[in-house]
Image (cartoon, grey):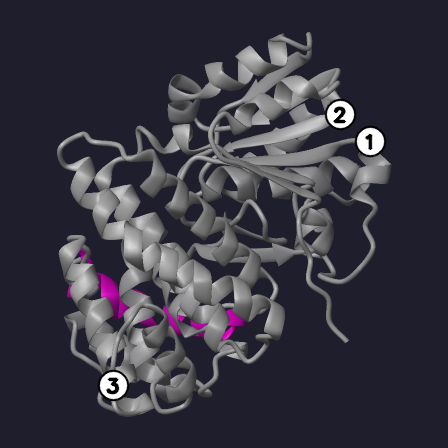
Amino acid sequence: MWDFTSPRKVIFGEDALEYLSEQSFKRVFIVTDPLMRKLHLHLLEDQLNAINAEITVFDEIEGEPTLQIVQKGAKLLAEAKPDAIIALGGGSVMDSAKGMWPIWASPEDGMDAIEGLDPFGKINLREKTGSILINIPTTSGTGSDVTWATVLTDNSSETERKASFGNRELVADITILDPILTKTLPRHLIAGTGLDAISHAIGGYLSTWRNDFSDAFLIHAFKLMWENISLAYNQAETGEVNFEIREKLHNAATMSGWGFGNSQIVLGHALGHSIGAAFKIAHSKCIGTTCWYSLMYNKNAEPNRIADLARAIGMKGKSDEELTEKLILGLKNLLLELDLPLSLEEMGVTKEKYDSEIEAVIEYALNDSGTLSNPRPVDYEDYVKIFEYLYIGKELDF
């Protein structure tokens, strides 16, 4: 038995933020980062002031949020006692809000409130806090606005790691997708977060936990991202913003999150999580590359599924194997077109740093959920070879 978990509402399209002024919130706690506070917070304040809501803002979220900053935010959240938590920002902000909520709900448990989460257990977040969660993404990629997992950095030991937690109650009540929030998105984030969404679509479609419902979201999300990401990236070079294209990307990122959040990630994210934590590489910078390696590694395990994705974007071929090779090459070319790296060397990882961290990196990757649900089994020896190839950008041949 399985279920498909989803927000109660997804508000999308032009002026979607106006939904806030139609509510009756008394107290609102906004989780964001310094840049989003500067660029977009006033748009939310305009809507919330119209209903005389009391607003508290916590804007200390970093690019790689830590368990410690989440604990600090949870303390302030408990003091504010809002009836709505609003996460305004990218995946880091939304993951942080999802981490704060259980700590507020069970203060006696401290960090165990998230570190000991049972993905399928009953934690009664809404009943204990009287609050709901609203996610408002400002990037088009992470899918965190509709997923029930959160990834935070644990820097309590000598080697940092990405700590993943999850529970179905962490899925937001409402997601608001307003393309106006992507107007200031720089080119490198259009590329990087867009590749994150593409990686979610590919990974979720290949995952051993896939299902008919996730497939429907993922394959269409992949099509929308593939058709529009280069257009948005190239337009941004001149400062042009086509909101029809931006809306397609924004919607597709959420659809991709919906899909993989109800199937799973695979090898690409296991690689991305581990090198991101160990080598301090932004997820948006490395995930496209690791997705390409994931496709190469899994090509003989799931040629029919990879061929499905190739057909969805109009590729032609005489066999599933031919289409699989075309998609692998197509993804490589897309990375090059979007000025994204093809190796750890290009990401700035020195050989000395690589050699000193690789054992910890492999250990983390082996314990990542993406390894568990990958269609082709991955063991220690496989990871040794994959990372050796990934370091220099060599295409997989095994």
* Residue 119 on image: x %, y %: 71, 61
Q: Residues within 10 Å of mark 2 (few under 14, many from 20)?
A: some
- Residue 199: x %, y % from top left: 38, 63
Judging by the rendered image, the residue that carries numbered circle 1 is 130
Q: Name the residue carrying label 2.
A: 83
Q: Dots 1 and 3: beta carbons under 8 Å?
A: no
3D distance between C-alphas at marks 2 and 3 = 54 Å
Which percent across, then down, holds residue 300? 35, 91
Q: Quadrant of residue 219?
A: bottom left
Q: In the shown orientation, is residue 27 left or right of residue 30? A: right
In what element is the residue under mark 3?
loop
Q: Position of residue 241 (x, y in %)?
A: 26, 32
Question: Where are the magenta residues, as a range?
Answer: 347-370
For image coordinates 35% across by 81% down, the residue present is 307
Q: Considering depth in this image, is 25 or 124 the residue closer to the camera?
A: 25
Determine the secondary structure under disc 1: loop
Viewer-nearest residue: 228 or 52: 228
Amino acid type indicated by mark 2 = Asp
Q: Main secondary structure of the magenta part?
A: helix
Residue 317 lies within the magenta run = no
Asked if residue 208 lies left or right of residue 247, the reply is right
Instruction: Identify the residue at image location x=65%, y=56%.
Output: 166
Q: Left of 223 or right of it: where is 8?
A: right
Q: Is residue 290 left or right of residue 14?
A: left
Q: Nearer the viewer, mark 1 or mark 3?
A: 3
Q: Earlier in the sequence, mark 2 or mark 1?
A: 2
Marks 2,1: beta carbons within 8 A = yes
> Which numbered dot is residue 317?
3
**Vertical arrangement, residue 364 with respect to residue 81, above or below:** below
User: Does the magenta run of residues contain 366?
Assistant: yes
Query: 323 above or below 9?
Result: below
Q: Quadrant of residue 398?
A: bottom left
